[in-house]
Image: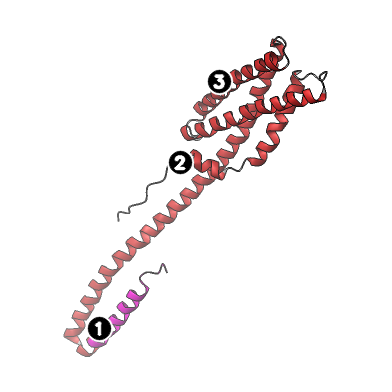
Amino acid sequence: MEITLPKPENSLPKREEQTQKLNDFGLRIVLIPLFAFAVPNLTGLIDYHYPFTTILIHYAYFFLISFSIYFGNRFLLFELSDKFNWFFSPFRKVLTLISGVMLFTIPITIFFISMYYLCIVNTEINWQVMRNVTLMNVICVIFVAHIYETVFLIKQTESEMLKAEKLERSKAEAELEALKNQIDPHFIFNSLNTLSHLIEKNPAKAKQFNDTLADVYRYILQNKGRNL
């Protein structure tokens, strides 16, 4: 008995589907301001000797840096999720992910911090602070990427389990339909043989058998579309 099953869908969900399913608004609201405040204070970038309004301007600039790095890497994560699968190429995924994070985060951090020193505070670039800020940004981005990839992996696992369940259901339905299609010819063949024998031996029973057979087929036609 040959059964045709539906082809499984692509195991990697598209970026648009992931964006719709992944509600990370709360994560962004918390982490972007947190990094904008924590990184300058932990690396010595912020100088509190300026007036309060100037410090607020500095923090607004740090927020812009945090926002740009966060959304740039977020876009990169969704793009990479379309290309690689944790189940089939985990090492390639990790290598590509870390490389992409560093190639994006390091240049944009150097650019923004250079502009901060040269255009906002009007001083020479402190390369020690620059290294600290760059390293801290890379660490923060890798931490956030780990959160996102964990969520992606959980959702992908759930999706694979759901697809496997649908495939098993489709297989069972196909087997049931094939069984239904085999029952009718066998039943007709056996019934006609019985009827032929009764016509020769006992015509009265043959007529009764024919009427009963008609009732059976009427019932089959009425209930053929049901699963049970």
**Does the segment drawn in magenta span residue 77?**
no
User: Which residue is more in the foreground, 207 or 146?
Assistant: 146
Q: Are marks 1 and 3 in contact (CB under 8 Å)?
A: no
Q: Which residue is mark 3?
A: 103
Specify the label residue 81 is tagged with. none
Q: Quick one: SS at disc 2?
A: loop
Residue occupying image coordinates x 42% and y 45%: 9
Say if 176 sits above or below 158 in the image.
Answer: below
Specify the label residue 11 is tagged with. 2
Q: Quick one: SS at disc 3?
A: helix
Q: Quick one: SS at disc 1?
A: helix
The x, y position of residue 117, in whole percent, is 70, 14
Report how far apart the C-alphas of labels 2 and 1 lie in the structure.
54 Å
Principal SS element in the magenta part?
helix
Q: Earlier in the sequence, mark 2 or mark 1?
A: 2
Q: Quadrant of the N terminus?
A: bottom left
Q: Are marks 2 and 1 in contact (CB under 8 Å)?
A: no
Question: In this view of the protein, can residue 20 be seen by the observer?
Answer: yes
Specify the label residue 210 is tagged with. 1
Which region of the structure is painted magenta?
Answer: 207-228
From the viewer's perspective, is the residue at label 1 or at label 3 nearer?
Answer: 3
Q: Mark 1 Cα within 10 Å, few/some/many (few <14, many 20+)?
A: some
Q: Quadrant of residue 145?
A: top right
